Amino acid sequence: MQRLGPLAFVLWLVCLDARAASATTRYHVRMTPQEVSGLTTTLAFEFTSSDTNTNTARILNFVHDGRAQPATHSGGPIYGKLLDGANPADTTTIEDFGFYAEVGVPFDSLGSQIRFSVDLTEAGPVAQAPPDELSLFLLRQSDLTPFPTADDLGADALFAIDVTGQAAGDLSVFSPMTFVAPDSLILGGHIADVPSGEGNEGRLRFRGTSPNPFSSGILLTYELPEPGGVLRIRVYDAAGRLVAVPFAGKREPGVWTTRWDATNASGRTVAAGVYIIQLEMRGQSLVRRVVLTR
Amino acid sequence: MPTMKHSLKPLWSSAVIMAWLHAGAANCQTLSAYSEFQAMPVDSLRTLQVKLTYGAASKGKFIPTLLFTSVYSAPTVAPFVPFYRADFGYSSDESTEPSFRAQLSELKTLIDSVGTLAAVTDGGVDPGGLLSFSLQNYFGGTSKVFESILDATNGTAVFAKALAAFSGNDSARTGLVAHACALGMMPGSPPQDVSSSVLVTLKGVRLNRKTGEFVGTVRVANTSGSPIPAPVIASIQLKGGVTLVAPDGFTSCLVPPWGTPYVKVLSSGSLAAGNSIQIKMRLDNPNSERIAFQSIRVLAGTGSP
């Protein structure tokens, strides 16, 4: 099995700035691979869409210092500078004119830094249609098979975002990629050693975060897939500081509700602002932002 | 000789005699008692054949004959022909369905379980009977054939026994269900349709590059105020050319539309009110069509899907 070797990617999720009116969510991402000389990979953006609206995933300001080839693509209309091999590439757009679209950026050698932003725009959800989804994969360039991750579906995505037509869709992160508040995703170690799926029988999901915005306390309702396991709920402030751990322990699968009373570990009331809720269990992380008002 | 059970038996016997006397019916031979097949050692069932023939093909409804044997033999109608009754239509035997093979233990179980149906093992002719249930085997140097002509009630009972005997043989069950449904003799009753008590959603659809299939998560949420008892299954039709990969089964005629693939959602216990369960779904989508449900039916509790 090919190993990535000692490796650390850092993906900076700088902003989950959402404009609800246009239902566009912008993600600023920076990846910092280390000690990966000789590694040939393909970074693949995958976009699936089952509703009938024309939605877009727009990759902006893609910059790297490695050796990359022109992007490959398949599926619906795709246009932009990544296809020309430009570096930097200002905009490459994937439209879900059809069901499946993909852009792959082959790297003969990963450099020390890759940066890009992604705008996800959806015209609105369609009733009865599965939500669109944007995923990121790291593939072996030789056969385009993915390095294994804890993706519950066995598809080995590094992260996946439901594009539901609502701002800031939930972000799912799969081990070995880990979420580090406020806006980092770190991928390190020997990625090929991670057992695909890690035995997860479903996806960690929020059922509700209510009320949001909130002023005194918020109820976090979430769904734990089979077979359950050790769950950690962490709350971070906008600067990425750990504020509270409303729950840490073993939980059976099912729907659970945990209340965070807007206090820190010392029991003191925290200031108004944006807080990041992270659920983590069996290699999956689920991230949602909530707003505390006073 | 098999014992008589109905008043038609003398008529049948007369017909046999009439046929026997008829020049063109020189192929009519003596049928064996069911007990002879029950007494056969398991190993001798290697050459056993079981035939289910719809006898009213001439009335415009054609249903190919279901003929199966053990994994050690090839099925053929020919050994049954000399035993044809003169007053039953065997034209369906001219077209036998591509069928399944059975393990010897399954055939033995079938014989023993049908052996509990006295109205079948008597080898008689039910009034209005339209289904020929026949066994044939070479034993003791001769070809032995048992036959009973069954009405819908007894035909349904035979299918119930057969489906139980082949509970671990998917291809056999598929063949038997198809035949039973075509005959209107599918045993059992459907599970309860709880579609109005649940919300079914599909999320997280992405390509599994190792298999070329698309994968997603189906979530079934109990939106009612009552628990939904297991087993819970979801029969799912998808639009276009998108199909489920490796469904847990296909619905019978008890759950129309017949032949719809279904997946098991919950095998034991119950789905509590307000609770939900997730299952992975594998989809074949060769043309990359948008994925959408054509119809979903969620069924729960005891019954045959």
Image (cartoon, rainbow, N blue to C red):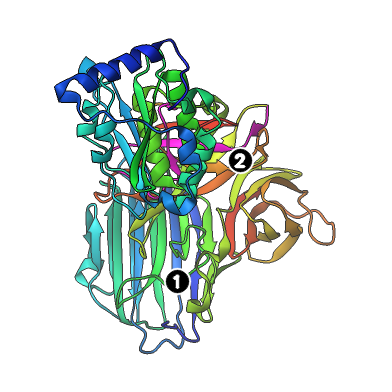
Q: Which residue is mark 2?
A: B276
Q: From the viewer's side, name the closer residue of A106 and B146.
A: B146
Q: Residue furthest left?
A: B23
Q: Secondary structure at mark 1?
A: strand
Side (left or right) of B250 relative to A67: right
x then y, percent, for residue B63: 27, 27
Q: Is residue A36 above or below residue B125?
A: below
What residue range appears in magenta? B226-255
Q: Which residue is mark 1?
A: A30
Q: Is residue B252 magenta?
A: yes
Q: Chain of mark 2?
A: B
Side (left or right) of A168 relative to B91: right
Front tag of 1 and 2: 2
x then y, percent, for residue B85: 29, 24
x then y, percent, for residue B165: 50, 41
Question: Which residue is at 30% across, 71% downward?
Answer: A105
